[in-house]
Image: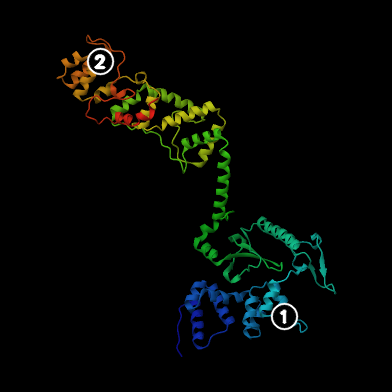
Amino acid sequence: MPCAIMEDGDDADALEASLIENLARLDPDEVSQWETYSRLVRQGRTVPDIAATFGITDLKVKRILALGDLLPKIREAYRREEIDAETVRHLTMASKAQQKDWLALCADPDQYAPRGFQLKQWLFGGQSISTKVALFAIEEYPGLITSDLFGEDSYFADADLFWQKQNEAIATRRDTYLNDGWSEVVLLEPGQYFHAWDHEKTPKKNCGKVVIAVTYRGEVECHEGWLSRKEARRAREGGEQEETAAKPPRPELTGPMQNYVDLHRHAAVRAAMLDHPAVALRLVVAHAITGSGLWQVRREPQRAANETVTASLAGCKAEAAFGKKRREVLALLGSPDEDGVVAGGNGDAFAIAGVFARLLALCDDDVMRVLTLVVAETLAAGSTVIEALGNHLNVDMGTWWQPDDAFFDLLRDKEIANSMLAEVGGKLVADGNVAEKVKTQKKIIRDFLAGENGRQKIETWLPRWMKFPAESYTSRGGFGTADQWAQVQPLFVRK
């Protein structure tokens, strides 16, 4: 006879080899297969592993393992072919109490034990619910209870009323388990059966769960200290660190239900907000200040081309006035950073709610001050909107700006310098210096502005570039500011 020598520790492999050898000679009965499959499961084999080894489907393996839900007497009777396969299939879905009742019927010569389709009707059909299955005190049942002629058995006449009381008792039992320290109590739907073969016994201290199964006849079975094999394997693979870590709770809502709740609440809130423009105004400001997943609000970074421009902007009168107003707005918002910025946050949802709550406490005038500063912080430098806004507001640049060292340092075009000299000193002076270097012409312009070196002081002078609207000195083009205004000017012409 052929002999296979297995290595130490290959118990599962030996079981597989034994059953495969038997299959090659004669198909074993399903009970024998169950004994082997269940031992393989205990050795760590999964259902797909077993199915692949024996060349059968996962469903076939699960059906065989379901025999483990039967009482031993029923399995042995099935092995002896005293019970047909259809009857056994239905009995695997019966509770232990139902299986005992069915065995009692089989043992009583004066009773009939339903089989096949009739057994299924006996397990699941009818509304006759015995008082024996009640978790609650019978005295608490307000409905009618019927008894047979001998008074040995009694039944609840109103099934709906029974289920109401039974569910209340199940909920109490569940709460008791949770209060006793069980990590989770799983309530199976009525008729859904607990399969021990697909679970491992796990104590409470190792996050074992309680599974409560309820039959259609009202019977309740509480299976204490179990984990599905997948959960148990994951716990073992996680090691001691994972075992001691706090187990994350099961979410109260599934993903689709959370989505359902979110969308309906969103629809109701935005419909209601349409009647509250003052609230909407404050929420707009809050979003502009903090940003969100749907709002991208960025401050103008005011990037300077070089250090000369940076130094000039730092000493700008308009920037100083803006900084003062910003500190006032930061104080209104309760910001601890008085030198910080207002708009362009990181989109944090809690931050939006915080700013929104602060704005709700402010009067309309203060909210408008905040909004105005937020808009000012987010105006893009060098954009068409600056030209449109500056012309609409009739901004007088002479109030906020005077030519400084940086301006003259950056002025390097001789033709333009001569045109500027004509503006401050007149055409004769400009023509008399038309061939001079740019440096010389700039020096004369500065003398006029300061009233030095015999030049008459010019109090107010703005280069065409700095006026609203901006103008060019030449026809060469390349002055973007003037081009932008020319593009939108027709939109702002008053009839």
Q: Report crowding for label 2: few under 14, some 14 to 19, many 20 or more residues within 10 A (C-alpha).
A: many
Q: Position of residue 207 (x, y in %)?
A: 59, 60
Q: Report crowding for label 1: few under 14, some 14 to 19, many 20 or more residues within 10 A (C-alpha).
A: some
Closer mark to the observer between disc 1 and disc 2: 2
Image-quadrant location for residue 138: bottom right
Whole-angstrom CA distance, mark 1 to mark 2, is 119 Å
Looking at the picture, tell me which residue is in the foreground, 56 or 125.
125
Looking at the picture, tell me which residue is in the foreground, 7 or 47.
47
Looking at the picture, tell me which residue is in the foreground, 241 or 291.
291
Q: Residue 113 carries which label?
A: 1
At 49% from the left and 73% from the top, the residue drawn is: 49
Q: Where is residue 476 in the image (x, y as percent from the top left)?
A: 21, 29
Left or right: where does residue 16 sit relative to residue 380?
right
Left or right: where does residue 413 sit relative to residue 1?
left
The amino acid type of the residue labelled 2 equals: Val
Circle 2: element type: helix
Circle 1: element type: loop
Query: Which residue is disc 2 drawn over?
Result: 424
